[in-house]
Amino acid sequence: MEGKIVTIPYHIEMADSFFKRLKGLMFRKDPIQNEGLWIVPCNAVHMFFMKFPLDIVLLNEQNEVIELHHCLQPWKMTKPVKNAYSTLELPAGAAEKLGIRIGSFIHVKN
């Protein structure tokens, strides 16, 4: 592993069922803080019905960051990423604050 390992200090909920992936963070009124959602499997996201922006981190099966969207706004979407296995949704600004970059490896500590 050449990339930096980034440990996420937030509570991360796993969305690994059809209904959890479908709902995601939609319809929440207040922006998330110190928490996130890890969607497995997932290679693209939409921000339909969202009321706040998110940082979107797309990961391969080794939890290496292969694409990053800072502050994705409501009603926007990402294109599918061929090698993405999962997506980590974090509060807007968290990726920069935590030093997440393309090539970083993500470790979640719940």
Image (tube, rainbow, N blue to C red):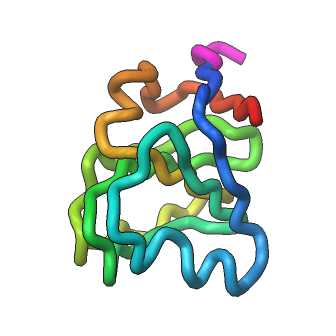
Residues 81 and 54: in front is 54
Determine whether, in the image, residue 35 is placed left or right of residue 60. left
Q: How many numbered discs? A: 0
Residue furthest out toward the front: 30
User: Residue at coordinates 59% horizontally, 21% vertically from top-left?
Assistant: 6
Image coords of residue 75 (percent x, y)? 23, 77
Image coords of residue 70 (percent x, y)? 29, 44
Residues 110 and 21: in front is 110
Residue stretch in magenta: 1-5
Residues 35 and 107: in front is 35
Residues 65 and 97: in front is 97
Determine whether, in the image, residue 41 is placed left or right of residue 4. right
Image coords of residue 28 (percent x, y)? 41, 71
Determine whether, in the image, residue 67 is placed left or right of residue 3. left
Secondary structure mostly taken by the magenta-highlighted segment of the chain: loop
* In the rendered image, the vertical position of residue 52 relative to residue 110, given as above or below: below
User: Residue at coordinates 48% horizontally, 69% vertically from top-left?
Assistant: 25
User: Residue at coordinates 22% horizontally, 62% vertically from top-left?
Assistant: 73
Image coords of residue 107 (percent x, y)? 70, 29
In which quadrant of the rendered view does residue 7 lie? Answer: top right
In which quadrant of the rendered view does residue 109 lie? Answer: top right
User: Residue at coordinates 72% horizontally, 17% vertically from top-left?
Assistant: 1
Instruction: Indicate whether residue 53 is drawn in magenta.
Output: no
Image quadrant holding the C terminus, namely: top right
